[in-house]
Image: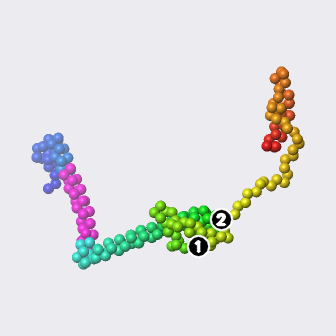
C-alpha cells in the first residue's frame, strides 16, 4: 500500500503533519535510490575484479610482467644516458677542435668523424688528456687549421688633403661684437671637411 496524502488525511492527520510525513518519506526514498545506484555501479566492477581473481587463480605470472617492465625502463634509461654522454663528448670535442685552431669546416668534420669511444670525460665534463687529443686533431685535420693574417686597410682613393688646417676654434671664432666670423654655410662646410679628414 502506497503512502499518499489521502491515506494520511484519512488517519486524521493535519495538513502540516501530512507535509512533514511526505517530506520525510521523500528523503528516505531518495536516499534508497542513491544507494541502489551505488550498488549497481559496484556490481558492474565486480566482473573486472572476478576476471583479475581468475587470472591469479590460473597462475598469471605477475613477477615476469614486473621484470619485463623494469627491463624496458632500465633499457630506456641506459639509452637516454648514452645519448647524453655522446652529446657531452661531441660538445667537449668541438671545444678542443676550436682551441686547436681548426676552421668551422674542420671542426664539423673532426666532430663528425672522430671515434667518440676514444674521447674520455672527467667528472666535470672536460676531456681527459686534452693536450694529446689536440695534437691528434692538428695532425689529422691539419689542412683545416685556420690561418689569419692582419693587413692594413686598402684604400684605393684616399681622402684629398687640401692642406687646410682649419680647427674648431677657427670655425667658431667670433668677432668683437659676439658674431661668428664665418657664415653658417661656411661653418658647416668646414666641419664636414674636418670630419672627412679624421
Q: Quadrant of the C terminus?
A: top right
Q: Secondary structure at mark 2?
A: loop
Question: For this view, does 123 lie left or right of residue 50?
Answer: right
Q: Quadrant of residue 16?
A: top left
Residue 186 horizontal/vertical position (percent): 86, 34
Please tell me which residue is depicted at 51% across the width and 63% down the height of the picture.
Answer: 126
Q: Which residue is mark 1?
A: 113
Numbered circle sitting on residue 103:
2
Q: Are marks 2 and 1 in contact (CB under 8 Å)?
A: no
Picture coordinates of residue 30, whole percent (x, y): 22, 53
Magenta span dominant secondary structure: helix
Q: Is residue 170 visible?
A: yes
Residue that protrudes farthest toward the bottom in the picture: 58
Look at the picture and state if 23 lies above or below 151.
above
Q: Secondary structure at mark 1?
A: helix
Q: Residue furthest top?
A: 177
Q: Image height check: is 144 above or below 155?
A: below
- Horizontal side of residue 108 vs 65, given as left or right: right
Seen at 82% across and 53% down, the residue is: 155
Instruction: Give the residue furthest to the right.
Output: 162
Q: Residues within 10 Å of mark 2 (few under 14, many from 20)?
A: some
User: What segment is highlighted magenta in the picture?
Assistant: 27-51
The answer to whether one can see residue 104 in this image is no
Magenta stretch: includes residue 7: no
Residue at 84% of width from left, 36% of height from top?
Answer: 166
Amino acid at each position: 500500500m502506497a503512502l499518499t496524502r489521502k491515506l494520511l488525511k484519512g488517519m486524521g492527520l493535519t495538513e502540516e503533519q501530512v507535509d512533514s510525513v511526505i517530506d520525510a518519506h521523500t528523503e528516505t526514498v531518495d536516499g534508497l535510490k542513491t544507494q541502489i545506484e551505488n550498488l549497481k555501479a559496484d556490481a558492474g566492477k565486480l566482473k573486472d575484479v572476478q576476471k583479475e581473481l581468475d587470472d591469479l587463480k590460473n597462475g598469471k605470472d605477475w613477477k615476469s610482467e614486473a621484470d619485463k617492465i623494469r627491463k624496458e625502463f632500465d633499457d630506456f634509461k641506459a639509452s637516454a644516458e648514452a645519448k647524453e654522454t655522446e652529446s657531452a663528448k661531441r660538445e667537449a670535442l668541438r671545444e678542443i677542435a676550436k682551441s686547436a685552431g681548426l676552421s668551422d669546416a674542420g671542426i664539423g668534420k673532426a666532430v663528425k668523424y672522430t671515434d667518440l669511444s676514444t674521447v674520455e670525460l672527467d667528472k666535470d665534463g672536460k676531456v681527459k688528456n686534452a693536450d694529446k687529443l689536440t695534437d691528434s686533431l692538428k695532425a689529422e685535420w691539419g689542412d683545416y687549421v685556420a690561418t689569419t693574417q692582419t693587413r692594413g686597410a686598402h684604400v684605393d682613393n684616399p681622402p684629398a688633403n687640401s692642406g687646410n688646417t682649419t680647427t674648431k676654434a677657427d670655425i667658431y671664432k667670433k668677432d668683437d661684437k659676439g658674431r661668428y666670423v664665418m657664415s653658417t654655410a661656411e661653418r658647416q662646410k668646414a666641419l664636414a671637411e674636418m670630419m672627412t679628414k679624421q
